[in-house]
Amino acid sequence: MSRELFKFKGGVHPPEHKAESSARPVRVAPLPKKLVIPLRQHIGSPAKPLVSVGDRVLKGQMIGEADGTISAAVHASSSGIVTAVDLQPVPHISGLPDLCISIETDGRDEWVEHGPLDYRAMAPTDLRMRLRDLGLAGLGGAVFPSAVKLDPGATQHCPILIINGGECEPWITCDDVLMRTRADEILQGVAIMRHLLGSTEILVGIEDNKPEAIAAMRAAAARMDFAAEIMVVPARYPGGGAKQMIQVLTGREVPSGKLSTDIGIQVFNVGTAYALARAVHHGEPLISRLVTVTGHVLRPQNFEVLIGTPMHALITLAGDRDGTTGVLMGGPMMGMPMPNLDVPVVKATNCILVQSAELFPPLPKALPCIRCTRCADACPAELQPQELFRFAKAGDFGRAQEYHLFDCIECGCCSYVCPSHIPLVDFYRYAKSEIWTREKDKRAADLARERHEFRQFRQEREKKEKAEKLAAKAQAKRAELAAAPDAGAAAPSEADAKKALIAAALARAQAKKAETAPQNTDHLSPGTQREIEEIEARRAKIRELARQPLEPDEKP
Amino acid sequence: MPSPFILDRSSVSQVMAWVLAALLPGIAVYVWAFGPGILVTLALATVTALAAEAAMLKARGYPAKPFLTDLSAIVTAWLLALSLPSLAPWWLIVTGTLFAIVAAKHLYGGLGQNIFNPAMVGYAVLIVSFPAQMTQWAAPLELTSAPLTLAQSASAIFGGDVPKATLDAVTMATPLDSLRTGLLQQHTVDEIMTQPIFGHYGGVGFEWLAAAFLLGGLMLWALRIVGWQVPLAFLAGIWLTAGFLHFFDPGRFGAPWFHLFAPSVMLGAFFIATDPVSGATTPRGKLIFGFGAGFLTIVIRTWGGYPDGVAFAILLMNLCVPLIDQYTQPRIYGGAKNTKAPPA
């Protein structure tokens, strides 16, 4: 059982604050009067709404279908009437509202017809499509569509499957509690993952501050018909980060700019494994999850919560107190402040952390960097944060990229240890978004130039065609005037040449576009990936709009 | 306000306070071995530094409180004071401190921006400009018959009516000065070492001072205020360079132990070369920085125009920091390396 563990560099150990919420049993949050279900709860394209205002929906009914490969469906968490399909405040770092389906619940909690899947008998592709339609997405925080991650691809295979029960962020205990109480179902989910990925080695990493979860998982693993090694890793933030967990359990590093599957490793959160078991063995879509409600509340605890439940309802359940200064979704290291408490619980909501001035004193004013390199000592990505800060502050984004800005996982260790109290991660986020904006502007400019060039080419061609037509007409007339009808063989070949010219111009434009790919921007941390997706989506729209006026020209 | 929402309890003032605390054993031994004059020097440098810092902050439009309470000006003042001869005249102390704070620190942009160690700039300016006054070292009490009291020391520093004969009686060349002078007079190292100023390793009194700074330095290391790289590499640079020379010609080159325990090396290794602002930042860079400073110290002591080389060695290495940092970028998680800057 005792396998060698490795270490990741850096990291910090902030006060854990886990006992507050893990001591109480899980409570099922009551059905709210209104559910607000965002169509974008995962990385990738938002789901497409399938219902309209006035429709009656059942619990577990798909109300938004997956749009494209990297997407996932969303479902009604309970039965009721759709009251709105519009923009609502959502828990997102931008603070901007997003398209949501609002449901007034009828209290009957009536299920749609559903049942278990015989996953062993199903073709893997069909099974993955079903999982996508059941809305499965990673519950560790990144909410990447699980169906995509469960596809080992044509050439790749995943000998190592890591189940992440690290839960390194202070305050959060939903994974801990899930492992304590539902270990068997987590491992049933693992069995399905193993089936789809063909993994031969199953490693479950749990931080040593969760002895009960470790015991429960070990007991459950012993009951399984496959070997899953429950490995106890030292509690050190961000040891529950996928890259760090891989490093600690296998001693291997995910190469910069690559995915873990490139080295034959796939990582899933324990919550995802549980949701997968519910989906396959019961046919239940992802409509609820465990949420830790903790911090400045009377009874910090974990709730089983329907997706779409407003956060204020949960805070009330846990006992709200005077002196609340703010609410975070997630932990204190990587969580995000909520714009208001009407925002719904989404698939990514692992924790609702209520702040008070006592628990979260206002951060002191920043002093200049003294280059003490404590940040470098704490950085699990082994970057030089002090240099990245210098470049970001100076607006020298090229240098920041050379120093691997995009390998930063935004874990916050550098900011945490900085004696000058500089919000370092802020500077990196700023630099990243600046780089994306510039990239976008550059692409827009490229597009405009392409369009301009094509327009010039078209005008040029039209002029030529007109002249040719005129010349031909004149000639024809002349020929007609001259004598007998014996012309007209050259026309089709001329049309072919024209087509070839257009094709060549388009190919040139395509090649130019391909050349201007951004550097170092693939395979990023989940948060940044999400931002990129959004930007990409907007770009796609622009491109689509830009293409329309060209079409009539392409088929004259 | 975005994440993270919690901070470790460290702060710049806390770091600086620990540095000051770690200097206390050295200061105590200083008083014990050389008399209380150093306290006057320290006080004068501190007051000057704080006044200069406040004035410069005001002139530059910065808030005074956060920067005065960060204690960095006091650290500079103490490091300079401890590098100066303990009976140096008041104007020398004031000039050096002003230069350190005004020119080396604030004209370069204030806290965190100075490319040279401010205390060492102050020291360098003084030794280049006023070499004669920079020799007024109090003799070790062990070797003087009538040591100065605190009042007498103050009086000597402030140019009071201390007779020149008295002052001559209580000041003395440092071991490094003596070695240098002796070698210039064609004596061998062994002959020179018979002079009373030389103790077991460094010099009478000075070796205890060095030991006390070493103790304070180890405390800083234990508290993780300084890393091991710079002090160890610095001491190794001194030891190996001096040892190499001594091995080939013990008659002309001082022993490595002597160089290690001569004044300023321990102070330099743990308190000055470790200044994060003007030092290298990468792990390998810190080793190169420290070793280079140690190497240059011995080179300057041996062939240079000044008896001690720590200050110049550190300033020269400060110059190299951008280059060192750029060429010693570590490998990051996932195997990539921070690339060098493209040619401009």
Image: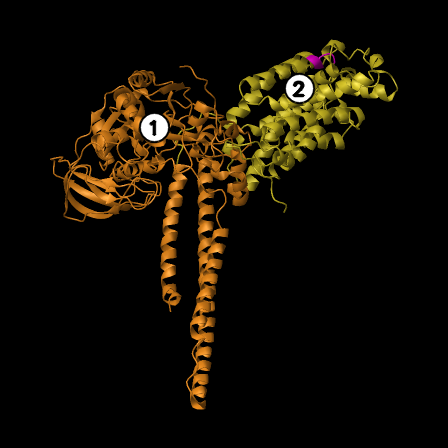
Image quadrant containing the N terminus of chain A: top left
Chain ID of residue with mark 2:
B
Alpha carbon separation for disc pair 1 and 2:
60 Å
**What chain is colored yellow?**
B
The secondary structure making up most of the magenta span is: loop
Q: Chain A: what color? A: orange
Depth check: A34 or A446 in front?
A446
Q: Is B205 within the magenta?
A: yes
Left or right, A450 with respect to B258, comes to: left
Local SS, label 2: helix
Q: Which residues are magenta?
A: B203-207
Depth check: B161 or A87 in front?
A87
To the question of a shared chain for discs 1 and 2, the answer is no
The amino acid beneath tag 2 is Met
Left or right, A492 with respect to A73, comes to: right
Circle 2 residues within 10 Å: few <14, some 14–19, many ≥20: many
| Residue B266: mark in rendering | 2
Which residue lies at the image location 42% right of the left edge and 33% below the top edge?
A261
Mark toward the viewer: 1 or 2: 1
Q: Say which residue label 1 marks.
A: A194
